[in-house]
Structures are given as C-alpha cells and as structure tokens.
Image: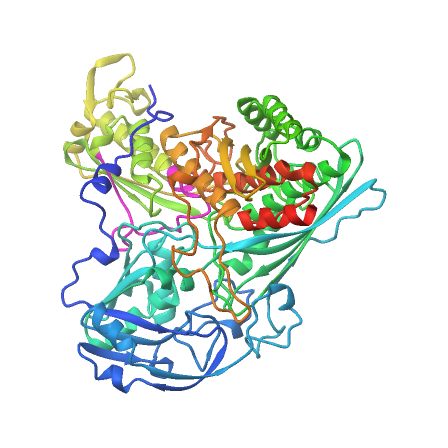
Amino acid sequence: MSILGNAVLRREDPAFLTVGGTYVGDLDLPDCAELVYVPSPMAHARVTRIDVSAAAAAPGVLGVYTHADLGVGPYPNPQPAFPAEMARPLLADGVVRFVGEPIVAIVAENSYQAADAAELVEIDFEPLAALVDPESSVGSAVVLHPSAPEGNVVFRTATASAASFEGCEVVVEARIVNQRITGAPIEGRAGAAYWDGDRLVHYSACQGAHPARDMLARIYGLPADRVRVIVPDVGGGFGSKARPYPEEVGLGWYSAQVGRPVRWVESRTSNMTGMGHGRGQIQRVRMGGRRDGVIEAYQLSVIQDGGAYPLMGSFLPFMTQRMTTGVYHLPNAGFDAVSVATTTTPVASFRGAGRPEAAAAIERAVDLFAAEIGMDPVEVRRRNVVKPFSEPYTTGVGTTYDVGDYGGSLERAIAAAGYEELRAEQARRRAAGETRLLGIGVATYVEVTAGAGGGEFGQLQLLEGGSILAKTGSSPHGQGHLTVWAMIISDRTGVPMEKIEVVYGDTDTVSAGGITGGSRSAQLAGSAMFDAAERLVEAARLRAAELLEAALDDVVIDRELGRFHVAGTPARALDWAAVAAASDPLVAQSEFAAAGATFPFGSHVAVVEVDVETGHVGLLRLVACDDAGTILNPLIVDGQVHGGLAAGVAQALFEEIVHDADGNPLTTTLADYAVPSAAELPSFERIPMQTPTFMNPLGAKGIGESGTIGSTPAVQNAVIDALAHLGVRHIDLPCSPQRVWDALRTAR
C-alpha cells in the first residue's frame, strides 16, 4: 500500500516545538562581529555630508564604512530587461531614494555597541521631491534615476492587441487598488559571512542556497567554487526572501576589512522598511458582454509600483498578464502594464507573485458585471468558465493551461457553503432592517506554478544498513519538504521513512539547486526524488540480480517489504541492507525538468458580517476548494492552504503599507501594521479535489500560494455584497472599518 496520499505527521515539527530551530542569529561563529546600518530618514534627498568620526571612535567599533569606502557592488538587477542605470549600490551613493536605504555600515564587537555608534553618525541632506504615487510617476518631473532611458519607467509588457468592446450590450469599468503589503516573516532578513582563506563562506536566511551562491560569486568576481552558501533554518520567506538583499551581500566585504566573521540580523522596523514589499498594483478593468450573462471582452491595464530600485516586483506584471483571463473563456482579451519607480521601499515577490493580482482584478470585474446586469455572480461564473478539459487549453492572452475543471471546483465550494441558504439568510436580515448584514463572496481562480521553468536536483545514496541519504536542491522554510521527500523515497523503495535522511541548503554538500518559490518544489524537487528513487531501485535490482544469480528481468522489488527477489519465489529475497553490504555504495541522481508549468485552480466562498453602524467586518466562514493535482500528504496540503488563506484574508481586511505624501512610511512596526492573529480568523473549511497533471510523474501541482489567490477577492466581494443593496459598488483593499464606513456614507 502506497504511503503517498496519507496524512503523515511532519517529521520537522518535534524539534521546532521543543528545542527550536537553528537560525542565522543562533549560529556559534567564533569571534563574530555584528553589523548595524544607519538608514536614510528621508525618502528622497541628496547626501551632502557624512561625519563618522565619533562613531569610529566609539567603544567596540571595528569599522565604519560609507559608499566611498566600498570595494564591491552594485547589486545586480534581477532582470536584464531593467535599466542598468537603476542598479542599486550596496550603500547609498550620493542620493537616497527611500526611507530605510542604508547609508553607513558599522561593524562592532556586538550589536548593542554598533547601534550606539550609529547614533553618533552625522549626515546632512538636501531634500528632493518625493514621488509616492505610481500613477503620476510615468510623466513626473521628479526622476529617481536621471540617466535611465525612459525616466521612471522600469518595465513594460502588453499583449499583441487590446480587447475590442464593439457590440457589447453592457460595459463596466473600475479602478482597483491592490495595495502594498509585506511578508512580515517571524525571522527578518539575516546573514553572516567570513573568509576561509580565499574562499567566501556565507550563511543566509534566504530561499535557496545555490542562487545566492551564484549572486555572490557574480558580485565578488569569484568562481562559484570559491563561494560556499549555507541556508540554516529559515523563519518564513513568502517570496520576499528569495535571494539576499544588498544589506546582506556586502557582509563578505565587511568581513575582509575587519578580519573576522560579520553577522547582520535586522530589526523589525528595518524589515518593514527595507525588505521588499508585495503587490502594489493599480489596476483599471473593463469588462463587456451580453445581458444574458455571457462575457465577451476584457481589458486589464496595470501600473506597477516598483519602488526605488527594481526587484522582481517590477517584473510581476508579466505574471499578471499570463493569468489575465483567469478561469473564463475569453478569446477577446487584452493586457498592458508599466512598472515605475517611486521613492518607496522596492517591491519584490510576495506569496502568489503577480497571480493574486490577476485574480483580484477579474473576480472583482465579474462581480461588477453581474451587478450591472442584475444576475447572481455565481450564475455569471457558470456561464463563462472554461469547460472541463484534459488536453492543453490556450487562453485569449496566449497562456496554455494543462488540465482543469473550474466549474467543478465552483460547484463543490458553493454546495459545501450552503449558498442558497446563505442567500436566504441575507435576504431575511435585509428585510428585517438589521444592522449586522450578511455578505457572500465568491472567487474562482487559476494560477501558474513552476512558471519560471527550469528543473531541480535530487540525489540518493544507499548507506550501510540499508538507510538512504537524500540530497535535495530545494531549501525549505516551513513547507514540510523533509517529510514529503522521505515519503516519496519510501514509497518507491520500500525503505522506512525513519531510515531516510534528507539534507539541503549547503552548496558544498548539494551540488545544485534552485529557489524554493513559485510553488515549484513538489512538482520539481519531489519529482527529482521520485526519479532518483526509481534509478536507485534499478541499480539495486542489478546488484540483487548478481547476488541472486538471476537474470535482471526476473528480479523484482517488493515495495511493501523493501526486498528484492526473483519473480515467483519471494522466499529467497535480499533487503536493502544486504544489497548495501555486498558492494560499493550505490548513488542515483536526477536533475528533473518538467515538461512545462502547471496550473492549479479552485474556488473560495467567503461569508462575512458587516456592522453598518461601525463599519466593522467579521469573517464568519471561508470555504476553500483548491485543486493542486495529486495530493502527496493531505495534512501538509491543509497547512499550506490554511496559511495561504490567512495571508489572503489579511490583505482583504487588515494589512496595508502606508506612506505619507513625503514618502515617510507610517507602518513601520507590528503595532501599526495589522497582521491578524488566530483570534481574527475562523476555522477554514477545506474541500478536497484532485485533478492530476501530466506534466510530472507525481501528477502534482503547487499548493503553497493557492489559498492566497482565491481568498482575497472572495472576502472583498463578500464585503461589497453585504452592502450592495445600499448602493455600495466597490471598496478598495483592505476593507477596513474606515473604508467601509466611508463607502456607506458616500452611498447614502
């Protein structure tokens, strides 16, 4: 009986829940110095004077550095399409462009002495105009990087043609804000570095050791084998910690200056102002169709806030473009986008990375269209979803989906929610004039996982006693890889999970690897483990055939018992320990590359209660039917979905990065940035559904981001639905009490 598909408890959890993990801040690095940065207090200014003399003389200080001192950098643009003139220096070079940009680096015996010395640095500024609004950035007289070829424009993308609305009976339009948020991981950014002779050793709290190694090798001008990167336990990443930031990549240079290991562990405020933010899109949607509910045209136009320097966030409109049409059959669709620079924290990837933005736009547009023609939003969705398909389907913007049954997920979700009963209760409350109104929101989505292509590395070594050492290029930060990879290997070999050790996150131990992001790991790294296990079985069969003095074709594996025997004579068998003892170690390796991306999908139903007297929104229920192909471990899938739902609800109701007109961030701590706790969230209701893909041998798609993608528009639609009969047409995210109250006041 296969172990895959069973709810196996995570083997990582006992240590995390008892002794805890080992993070960068926990590392015992002998004689390690600590680094603190002096950040910019201004969003945009020219630096006219820096005096570090008092800081350099402070107790415990080993070195104080400005951009003029640096012998390394700049930070490379993550995409070659970005203007080279916008590349970011590791320390501000004459001009600061966002609050929190590092200006001075201070290395001291400990972080307390470094922080004290930072207070002694004197910096004079000549203020420059701030540019906070991305909509005005394209033609603004305020240009952040004057030598860039197109002013503040970082990146453009568009479909070959725009949608045509000729002949549409109904056309709806709206401006939608997909606000800035931050990942707020429990562990902020952190790194440590030292030199072992002429070799750089770097510890990083990031999402992939090998991409970090390659970046450092490029920055320092070293061959890759002279850089070792180790990723210990990581306290959350969510895309924002995909690769090391400028504050971290300079650690090797600072270490060389002081002749000691140097560590940097940021504060929460530094994390809120310096780590890449997410989302940050202003969208204009236009949808047209017939009064019988058929949608005939859809155009999405995006302005992406890229922040002061381009990170992956500036490229994410391309991912939004791929998913423009969502689950709907819309041959007549168009997309255009421009990413722009502003005097704010750079925007990076955050859970979903461009796909939640696409879902938010079209799912709001569908509800607006349904309201305009007076049809139930579920019925509009039924009339327009792509019919079930098991062969590739190409959308109106040229994206090819693998397999899907979008209508099936919708029907499961609304049945589980009791949709008709909810509508009846909503009508009762409205008729009774109650002040606590019920809202029901629906969102049906499709997303892309492993969308960047590439492959993943896996290697298995058969050890003495029949145990297996597995090496994976995928570095976990909460996903449960150690459990799932062991399950896959055990399933294919019959070796018990307790005899399988999985190692990762060290470029000296594992020869190759990618980023753990984009929900790629199960389908790529998991398939690499599957493939390597099959190869190991074949090598072991060959060895067993020699030992049994039988033809190779006659030797089979009994995966239930983990033994090899001649077909038809199971009494004479060899277990893995016997195979291991009889020869040199067996090693099997895979560098698995999928045939293409996969496209998970699902439907969410949110039920909210809105108090019209206070504007308060309470989330009563969230029903989620998410289909990620073959489920390898339902317990881990539930955890991934629940985490995604929490993140999506947080964006819908609570979280928002706010700047004032001068570019000053107003949400710099967890006291003013509203991360929800369990008290603000209901117990989520998950409805299973599996539509295996043909893109990999496991039939698996990604699941880590799905919950985030469907939940945000479902909750937003629910809040607006509760107030629709009062004249409320739209409320931008987050649907805070203030925004709800303002919408009601305007409608009245």
Q: Residue at x 66, y 41 (%)?
A: 395
The answer to which quarter of the image holds residue 338 is bottom right
Question: Can residue 432 be spotted in the picture?
Answer: yes
Q: Main secondary structure of the magenta part?
A: loop
**Viewer-proximal residue, 634 or 404?**
634
Residue 254's spot in the image, x, y percent?
Answer: 27, 74
Q: Toward the viewer: 106 or 146?
A: 106
Residue 139 lies within the magenta run: no
| Quarter placement of the N terminus | top left
Q: Nearer the viewer, residue 123 or 220?
A: 123
Specify start and end residues of the magenta stretch as a single range.
500-527
Q: Is residue 35 above or below residue 728?
A: below
Would you say residue 597 is visible in this rendering? no
For residue 288, side relative to residue 644 (left or right): right
Residue at coordinates 83% horizontally, 40% vertically from top-left?
Answer: 169
| Residue occupying image coordinates x 41% and y 64% | 274
Rendered position, 595 above or below 88? above
In x, y percent, where is residue 120? 29, 81
Instruction: Report the front residue among 310 and 501.
Output: 310
Question: In which image quadrant can residue 439 be found?
Answer: top right
Quarter of the image containing the C terminus?
top right
